[in-house]
Image (spheres, rainbow, N blue to C red):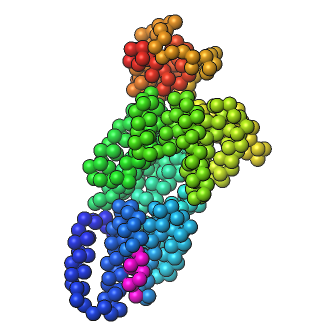
């Protein structure tokens, strides 16, 4: 419980050796069940669904009916196994059972852990206000100074406030999560916190900072064999690479880790809407069957954007309306904004039901508050896409425009470029318009790719 896990298995084996040959009476059976419960808890730290489930069931089979504290712990670990397996209904029932016992007997630790589990399920079901309430309750129980396990509640709150587009609050909870996770001897929670920190940096346009944080997280995860974190790291690395114009590397990474939503993002960035739709269709079917609202929402937004881009405005509007109905109760914002100009054009160009007009205005206001990545241009998207990447420029870039282009390629936001070059934000945006017009592109990723093709970078 204090986070020093490396020597626990050795002690459990010693306990089993001491029980060897003992009469299998109620007391011995209860000890066997207790050992199994501790092993299930160890497996929780490594997110191993099979061992967690097997040891939890063994614990519940052997534990004495009156051993309520350990039975509550076993119910909680079984709930986590169900959660990892995607069985959210069974997970919720197990967490409720653990809570009913732990609250009755005053077992604070299991009350905290089961409430965290409930918060995870509420979050996945897009019941974000309820999830935030669960995590805040955990922080109250965790005390001051807080128990290290409070890192998970801070991490959940950071995710929620990020989705609500409340950047400062999300950052505060994310940093606190990383700090508390550092008190554990062996836990991947610190890596998970850094992945979220990278997302926060990316949302503010600090692409280079996000890339550096992800590189550190990846190194740590591989050195300490936190293999379950690798796909989560890759899922954030893909949009970072897209911002940097590294479309080929993003495509390889998304395919390597089997990330369909990331693959769809790359396909859209490449202009291959057919490939994006082909990737997303099975995702939407599977998430609908399994009731995974969080994954389904992200898939629907991408699917609607792909339909809109390929001219199916009716299908795009229908899919968008369904996505907004899922998203609006939870107050989701970043799920839309993170998809960039494609999602903004979709929201502006599609008809939505009357009851969703206020929500659309809220989403568009969030887009408007973002630092623009793609300045307006008199040229149409169609005419831009007809330009060959290696076609010579009609007008050369000035020395200052080349300097700014270099900073764009380094992943700096408009505000960071202004600070670096002592320019007003409006001046930087003006230079961006000139650069984009001269390169005949409509977004940063295209500008970087074309500039590299022309030998400007």
Residue 63 included in the magenta stretch of the image: yes
Q: Quadrant of residue 426?
A: top right
Give whichever of 411, 414 is nearer the camera. Answer: 411
Q: Position of residue 439 (x, y in %)?
A: 51, 15
When the figure is inspected, residue 409 is found, relative to residue 252, above or below; the finding is above
Do we see residue 425 in this rendering?
A: no
- Residue at 55%, 36% in the rendered image: 275
Where's the N terminus, which quadrant?
bottom left
Q: Is residue 323 visible?
A: yes
Q: Position of residue 290 (x, y in %)?
A: 57, 59
Q: Main secondary structure of the magenta part?
A: helix
Residue 194 lies, with reference to residue 33, above or below; the image says above
Which residue: 54% across, 64% down?
88
Looking at the rendered structure, the number of numbered marks drawn on it comes to 0
- Position of 124 with respect to 23 (left or right) is right
In the image, taking residue 19 as reference, residue 158 lies left or right, namely right
Residue segment shown in magenta: 56-64
The quarter of the picture where the C terminus appears is: top left
Front-lying residue, 306 or 367: 306
Q: Position of residue 371 (x, y in %)?
A: 54, 30
Magenta stretch: includes residue 192: no
Q: Residue at x 38, y 36 (%)?
A: 211
| Residue occupying image coordinates x 34% and y 52% | 227
């Amino acid at each position: 419980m204090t986070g020093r896990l490396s020597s626990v298995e050795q002690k459990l084996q010693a306990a089993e050796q001491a029980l060897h040959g003992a009469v299998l009476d109620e007391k011995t059976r209860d000890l066997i069940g207790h050992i199994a419960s501790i092993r299930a808890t160890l497996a929780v730290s490594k997110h191993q669904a099979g061992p967690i489930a097997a040891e939890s069931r063994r614990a519940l089979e052997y534990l004495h009916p009156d051993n309520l504290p350990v039975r509550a712990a076993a119910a909680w670990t079984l709930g986590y196994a169900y959660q990892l397996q995607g069985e959210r209904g069974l997970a919720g029932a197990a967490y409720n059972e653990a809570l009913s016992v732990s609250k009755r007997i005053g077992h604070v630790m299991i009350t905290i852990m089961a409430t965290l589990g409930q918060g995870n399920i509420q979050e996945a079901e897009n019941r974000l206000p309820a999830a935030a309430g669960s995590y805040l309750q955990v922080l109250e129980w965790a005390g001051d100074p807080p128990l290290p396990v409070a890192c998970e509640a801070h991490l959940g709150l950071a995710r929620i406030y990020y989705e609500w587009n409340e950047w400062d609050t999300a950052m505060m909870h994310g940093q606190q999560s990383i700090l508390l996770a550092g008190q554990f001897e062996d836990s991947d929670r610190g890596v998970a916190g850094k992945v979220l920190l990278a997302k926060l940096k990316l949302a503010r346009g600090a692409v280079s900072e996000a890339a550096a944080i992800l590189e550190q997280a990846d190194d740590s995860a591989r050195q300490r064999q936190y293999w379950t974190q690798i796909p989560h790291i890759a899922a954030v690395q893909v949009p970072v690479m897209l911002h940097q114009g590294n479309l080929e590397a993003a495509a390889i990474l998304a395919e390597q880790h089997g990330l369909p939503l990331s693959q769809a993002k790359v396909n859209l960035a490449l202009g291959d809407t057919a490939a994006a739709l082909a990737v997303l269709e099975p995702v939407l079917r599977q998430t609908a069957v399994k009731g995974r609202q969080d994954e389904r929402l992200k898939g629907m937004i991408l699917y609607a954007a792909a339909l809109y881009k390929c001219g199916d405005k009716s299908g795009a509007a229908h899919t968008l309306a369904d996505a907004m109905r899922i998203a609006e109760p939870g107050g989701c914002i970043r799920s839309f904004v993170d998809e960039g100009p494609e999602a903004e054009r979709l929201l502006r160009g599609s008809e939505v039901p009357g009851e969703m007009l206020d929500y659309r205005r809220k989403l568009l206001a969030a887009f408007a508050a973002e630092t623009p990545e793609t300045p307006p241009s008199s040229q149409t998207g169609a005419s831009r896409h007809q330009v060959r990447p290696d076609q010579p420029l009609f007008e050369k870039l000035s020395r200052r425009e080349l300097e700014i282009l270099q900073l764009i390629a380094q992943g700096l936001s408009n505000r960071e470029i202004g600070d670096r070059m002592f320019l007003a934000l409006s001046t930087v945006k003006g230079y961006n318009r000139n650069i984009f017009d001269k390169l005949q592109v409509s977004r940063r990723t295209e500008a970087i790719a074309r500039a590299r093709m022309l030998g400007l970078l």
